[in-house]
Image (spheres, coloured by chain):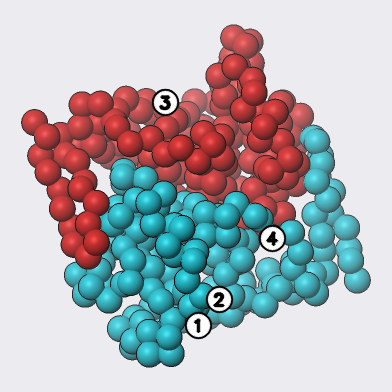
Chain colours: A red, B cyan
């Protein structure tokens, strides 16, 4: 599941991810390989404590968005979120979130008002955050996928 | 993972899901409970063979969209897809897809040109399909989540 969160964050244009608490060298390795093949710089830090990560982020002027079904509707808050210049930390979780996260977040945002996956919530949120402009180029890619009607086409780019 | 696909499909407005090949009564049960609590009619059929499911769908005039990184960019084809009146079957898979699926699909669609999760690809595709109009009401819900700035608020509706 964490791999799906990472791939989604990277594909939609995040700079990196912090994975709370548990170390996961396999995840780091998987994402390193994806970066080597498909380009871009996406940092993965695992085993970091969530509380101090959020605190540090806010201390340096960053803002925190927590995706939760209990939050305010995406469509109502996205313009306000987009209008701020600060770096954004988006918090998602598989399990029940500590109540403290709801308080620490600058925005608690609901992607639909229904139970949903944190993977799709993240993807939809980021797509809206970037105003539905999907990023096309990842610098330094070794492979590039060429859009096909019914086939598979991959070119080596270096 | 299949639960995440189901929750995403339901939250974004799909009528139901076919889960290919393996029977999964736990999934059926989970989604039945979600429906009882949060409303709507979302059908789950598991253990269905993918080939005949797609064939039947097409025979009755439905169209098939296969989400794959090798396909045509979402932003280039969504208007054409939206403009058709047919019922849509959206095909996603965790594993390597049989080449036949690429041929059977009316559209092979890429959500970003990067490796991504099928869960977020489905969520983003459906959000675009419905022109970013999230559905607010699911009839017959027993619970409704009330948007909160920093809290959790759920009301019983019957």
Residue at mark 4 to residue at mark 2: CA–CA distance: 15 Å
Residue at mark 3 to residue at mark 2: CA–CA distance: 35 Å
Chain containing the residue with disc 3: A
Residue at mark 3 to residue at mark 4: CA–CA distance: 31 Å
Q: Which residue is mark 2?
A: B16
- Total labels: the figure holds 4
Q: Is residue B156 visible?
A: yes
Q: Which residue is mark 3?
A: A15
Rendered position, A135 above or below A124: above
Marks 2 and 1 in Cβ contact (< 8 Å): yes
Chain containing the residue with disc 4: B
Of tags 2 and 1, the one toward the viewer is: 2
Q: Are marks 3 and 4 on the same chain?
A: no
Residue A130 location in percent, x, y? 51, 34
Residue at mark 2 to residue at mark 1: CA–CA distance: 8 Å
Of tags 4 and 2, the one toward the viewer is: 4
Q: Are marks 3 and 2 on the same chain?
A: no
């Amino acid at each position: 599941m964490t791999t799906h969160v990472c791939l989604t964050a990277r594909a939609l244009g995040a700079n990196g991810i912090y994975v709370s608490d548990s170390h996961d060298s396999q995840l780091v390795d998987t994402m390193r390989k994806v970066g080597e093949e498909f380009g871009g710089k996406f940092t993965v830090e695992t085993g970091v404590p969530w509380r101090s990560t959020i605190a540090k982020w806010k201390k340096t002027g960053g803002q925190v968005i927590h995706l939760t079904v209990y939050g305010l509707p995406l469509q109502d808050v996205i313009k306000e979120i987009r209008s701020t210049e600060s770096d954004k930390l988006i918090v998602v979780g598989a399990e029940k979130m500590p109540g403290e996260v709801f308080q620490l977040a600058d925005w608690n945002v609901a992607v639909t008002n229904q139970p949903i996956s944190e993977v799709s919530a993240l993807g939809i949120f980021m797509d809206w955050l970037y105003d539905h402009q999907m990023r096309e180029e990842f610098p330094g890619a070794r492979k590039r996928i060429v859009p096909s009607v019914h086939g598979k086409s991959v070119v080596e780019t270096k």
